[in-house]
Amino acid sequence: MRVDVVTIFPDYLAPLELSLVGRARRDGLLDLRVHDLRDVTTDRHRTVDDTPFGGGAGMVMRPDVWGTALDGVIGEGPAVLLVPTPSGERLTQSMAQELAGAERIVIACGRYEGIDARVAEHYSAVPGVQVREVSIGDYVLNGGEVAALVVVEAVARLLPGVVGNPASLVEESHGEAGLLEYPVYTKPPVWAGLAVPEVLTSGHHGRVARWRRDQALARTAERRPDMLAALPPGDLDAEDRRV
Ligand code: SAM
């Protein structure tokens, strides 16, 4: 997969050289390139913004500057143009799964009051380009760079070979089961007066599996009743209904 991030703060994306994403880049599993939006400007001040039509506070990013930058990056072939914005569709695990199937993602990081709305409109009409305006949550950040970090991390870990043991992706929160993950424990067996649940040291795989399922259900019911309510009725067996 190739991901291009366009931003006025390329240094903000430095963490993508670390950890699993950094290794995926070095191993050739992820071709990630960061571009400075100001490189396409032609004036002395390298201007990327201007005052909003209709008045009001703040500045808006200019569509002509973004157009030049994105035309240079998108190129030929299918691509997702991902525009982080608090007014976009909410990022979910299933959206991350969809994005992990894309060949190319271009992320346009806004700043100030955001990017002139004609940019998303224009590229929506470009053949092969799918525009997705995406929010990482119901709060407002200063810019799209942190959202780009979140999207890249959520998507890259789903690419084949990025996470060493693919089994660790199976039972996660927000996965296929539609539940939050059960609580996890490691050594020592007693810490700060707290013992690990006895069943986990029993060596009985069937009991461990049942306990984990019960914990996942109880945790989801308590913390995210909306997720439990959204489960298709057939997804719960008689044992589940007891919890
Ligand atoms: N005026 C905009 C509004 O109220 O919708 C907010 C602009 S915000 C200060 C500047 C930039 O931060 C946005 O263009 C977007 O790139 C990014 N941003 C802020 N909050 C975000 C969120 N929750 N999800 C994704 N991107 C966000």
Image (cartoon, rainbow, N blue to C red):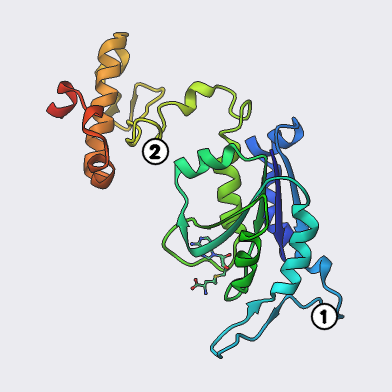
As drawn, 76 above or below 203: below
Where's the C terminus, which quadrant?
Answer: top left
Residue drawn at (32%, 35%), measured in percent from left and top? 179
Q: Nearer the viewer, residue 142 or 110?
A: 110
Residue 31 at what x, y percent from top left? 74, 40
The reply, left or right, for residue 188 in relation to residue 240 is right
**Helix, strand or loop status at disc 2:** loop
Check mark 2 vs ligand 1: CB closer than 8 Å? yes or no.
Answer: no
Q: Nearer the viewer, residue 99 or 241?
A: 99
As drawn, 142 above or below 157: below
- Type of amino acid at the residue the image marks with label 2: His
Residue 231 at what x, y percent from top left? 27, 37
Query: Would you say the residues marked 1 and 2 are in contact, meaning their CB atoms lie under 8 Å apart?
Result: no
Count of labels in the image:
2
**Circle 2 residues within 10 Å: few <14, some 14–19, many ≥20:** some
Give me the disc on residue 138: none
- Type of amino acid at the residue the image marks with label 1: His
Residue 9 at what x, y percent from top left? 71, 63
Residue drawn at (32%, 30%), measured in percent from left and top? 182
Q: Residue furthest left?
A: 242
Choose top left, top right, bottom left or bottom right for residue 45.
bottom right
Can you identify the residue that label 1 sits on?
45
**Helix, strand or loop status at disc 1:** loop
The reply, left or right, for residue 230 in relation to residue 88 is left
The reply, left or right, for residue 44 in relation to residue 57 is right
Give me the disc on residue 174: 2
Residue drawn at (77%, 60%), measured in percent from left and top? 71
Distance between mark 1 and mark 2 Cα atoms? 45 Å
Residue 218 at what x, y percent from top left? 22, 35
**Circle 1 residues within 10 Å: few <14, some 14–19, many ≥20:** few
The tag earlier along the polypeptide, 1 or 2, is 1
